[in-house]
Image (tube, rainbow, N blue to C red):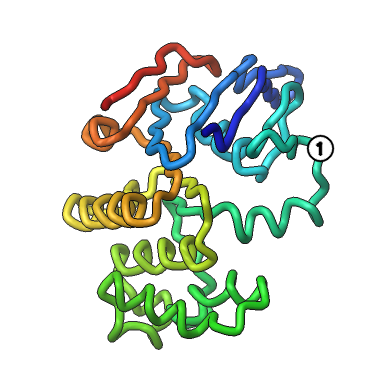
Amino acid sequence: MIILETRNVTKRYRLGNREITVLDSVSLSVAQGEFLVVKGESGSGKSTLLTILSGLDRPDAGRVLIENDDITDLDEDALAPLRNSTFGFVFQSFHLVPSLSARENVMFPAELAGDPKAREKAEALLARVGLSERMGSFPHQLSGGEKQRCAICRALINAPRIIFADEPTGNLDSVNGAGVLELLLELHRERGTTLIMVTHSPEIALRADRVVTLKDGRIVADGSRA
């Protein structure tokens, strides 16, 4: 079953007097439960594609569909609950709120959704990733690997159907990076969550069900790793 689709998506930016086409008529379908890696050189359009797929940005042309529902023209009020419940986000920068503890950071999306079990779910997730003793710690008291595990818990707390991960191991050393990747893959397998990851890493690409390669804003390769 196709869960996410783009149809001829184009995105342009203005740089001074120049107009730069970052994505050029990109059409892509993603199956429910698939682990898809998007790779390409810097400037190829990888992160822009991720932001458009996830509704964080709009295309200048083309359509974005979630299970055949067109979300391209939805306003912020309509997109907000979709981002909070259907989508989960893990970025290279952890984006934790400095004034909130690890527990409070993880709870935040569930509290926004009005979940009365927000605290219980946050604590269970943090325990699951080995942060039981760090729940009350603030971001500045956590290591890079701990911050990223906390960010993953926050992405998962509303049981999203799709996780978008943009270079999630990019700011981590090799040991923590490997641990974070294994955690994402383990949770992806356990929950059947669709995982769409932007990465430069050939090692991560080899673990994917499918790899899409972008160059100059176009898909130049799309192949199964199964």
Q: Is residue 121 left or right of residue 69?
A: left
Q: Residue furthest front?
A: 1
Residue located 45% across and 78% down the image: 122
Q: Position of residue 97 (x, y in %)?
A: 54, 72
Looking at the image, residue 50 lies above or below residue 140: above
Looking at the image, residue 50 lies above or below residue 78: above
> Pointer 1: residues within 10 angstroms few (<14), some, or many (20+)?
few
Q: Quadrant of residue 57?
A: top right
Residue located 42% across and 30% down the image: 38
Numbered circles on residues, count? 1
Looking at the image, residue 75 lies above or below residue 4: below
Q: Position of residue 105 (x, y in %)?
A: 51, 75
Locate the C terminus and report the quarter of the image it occupies: top left
Q: Is residue 145 left or right of residue 136?
A: left
Q: Position of residue 115 (x, y in %)?
A: 61, 78
Amino acid marked by disc 1: Asp
Q: Is residue 186 left or right of residue 89?
A: left
Q: Quadrant of residue 20?
A: top right
Q: Quadrant of residue 206?
A: top left
180 or 41: nearer the eye? 180
Residue located 35% across and 65% down the image: 149
Q: Position of residue 102 (x, y in %)?
A: 43, 78
Tell me the SS state at disc 1: loop
Q: Which residue is mark 1?
A: 73
Looking at the image, residue 27 lies above or below residue 207: above
Q: Residue furthest top?
A: 220
